[in-house]
């Protein structure tokens, strides 16, 4: 969700173009390298559960990072210099990638909570079984004191491997939902986006039809901002509660399940701190300006230009931090960067 606009009077760029280009090259370039590294590394190992979602998030962040460079440049220059076709591609890809990334962050949190729930049930079953074994052993000991002379029946033992318990949580249904929703929300942008030429060689990349713009961004505000933010807030609170219950976490054998909880919490914090300001500012720009009834009303003042550049600059940092956190916190992602073979019996 973004709207590229500018004042109709010729003004100087907010930041020196060379400085902005250096910033975009460093941050976006590092983000692209990190996401490509995660994608390449995960293709070398078995992908299931959490790793599948992380791979999808890396792909979405790679697309999103490619669109934020032109966005920052246009905000700073107060014009869209990249042409009609680039405008359509930019607007569609931005909505598509931002939707995918936000819902995948929520999916990681929900998947981690579901996995921990399965692990807790496995721990409860194991503790219950151990208690039953202890009771059986006590009864057997008491019985042997009474009938110690009867040694014809050999003792029976039973070995149970609790690691064979199926703890996998399917990620196919939520993944399909996320990608279908993202495609559905981006289609109107591809159809309605256009460039508008104004005075002083100024070009807007926008949706000209004001009624369609308000209707479409009302839907985007609900599905691309408030709904994922609501889901993340609830999931984040539940993750914090789970992380504070040390007694249960200490009994869980799969360390990666706990690591996934920490990753999901950090991803939610990054989304709220670095991503939501841009979405809120964009929504404010659209709803405060579109009521005037024409495309030129979308032109922000100098103060809004500063805010737009600042929020987009922080947003692009999130595409760098997310793959770095995946590498740092998830053991199997980190192990996949090694040249040696690595196998794991735990599916998260």
Image (tube, rainbow, N blue to C red):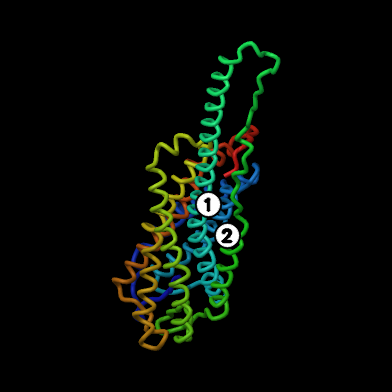
Residue pointed to by mark 1: 111
The single residue placed furthest to the right in the displayed view is 152
Q: Secondary structure at mark 1?
A: helix
- What secondary structure is marked by label 2? helix
Q: Residue at x 39, y 84 (%)?
A: 296
* Residue 208 image offset from top left, x and y in percent: 48, 84
Depth check: 47 or 339 in front? 47
Residue 115, position in %: x, y?
A: 53, 47
Residue highlighted by disc 2: 174
The residue at the far bottom in this view is: 293
Q: Quadrant of residue 15?
A: bottom left
Say whether marks 2 and 1 touch (CB < 8 Å): yes
Q: Which quadrant: the N terminus?
A: bottom left
Q: Position of residue 91 (x, y in %)?
A: 51, 72
* Residue 8 showing in the rendered view: yes
Residue ranking furthest to the top: 149
Q: Position of residue 55 (x, y in %)?
A: 58, 51
Relative side of 51 to 203, left or right: right
Residue sitting at 46 percent across and 46 percent down? 261
Q: Identify which residue is drawn at 39% across, 88% down.
A: 293
């Amino acid at each position: 969700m973004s709207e590229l606009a500018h004042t109709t009077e010729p003004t100087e760029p907010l930041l020196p173009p060379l400085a902005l280009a250096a910033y975009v090259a460093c941050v976006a370039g590092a983000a692209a390298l990190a996401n490509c590294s995660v994608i390449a590394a995960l293709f070398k190992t078995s992908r299931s559960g959490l790793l599948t979602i992380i791979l999808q998030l890396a792909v979405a962040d790679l697309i999103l990072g490619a669109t934020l460079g032109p966005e920052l440049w246009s905000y700073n220059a107060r014009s869209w210099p990249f042409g009609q076709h680039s405008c359509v591609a930019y607007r569609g890809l931005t909505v598509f990638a931002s939707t995918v990334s936000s819902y995948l962050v929520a999916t990681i949190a929900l998947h981690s909570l579901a996995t921990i729930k399965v692990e807790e049930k496995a721990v409860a079953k194991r503790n219950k079984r151990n208690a039953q074994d202890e009771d059986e052993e006590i009864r057997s000991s008491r019985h042997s004191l009474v009938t110690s002379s009867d040694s014809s029946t050999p003792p029976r033992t039973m070995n149970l491997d609790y690691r064979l318990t199926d703890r996998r949580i399917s990620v196919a249904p939520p993944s399909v939902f996320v990608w279908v929703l993202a495609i559905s929300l981006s289609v109107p942008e591809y159809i309605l986006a256009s460039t508008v030429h104004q005075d002083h060689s100024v070009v807007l990349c926008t949706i000209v039809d004001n009624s369609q713009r308000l209707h479409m961004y009302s839907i985007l505000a609900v599905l691309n901002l408030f709904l994922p933010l609501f889901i993340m807030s609830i999931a984040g609170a539940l993750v914090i509660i789970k992380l504070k219950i040390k007694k249960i976490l200490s009994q869980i054998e799969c360390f990666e399940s706990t690591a996934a909880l920490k990753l999901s919490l950090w991803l939610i914090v990054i989304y709220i701190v670095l991503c939501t300001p841009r979405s809120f500012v964009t929504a404010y720009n659209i709803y405060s300006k579109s009521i005037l009834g024409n495309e030129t009303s979308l032109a922000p003042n100098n103060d809004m230009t500063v805010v737009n550049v600042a929020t987009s600059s922080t947003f692009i940092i999130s595409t760098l931090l997310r793959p770095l956190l995946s590498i740092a916190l998830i053991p199997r992602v980190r192990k996949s960067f090694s040249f040696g073979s690595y196998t794991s019996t735990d599916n998260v």
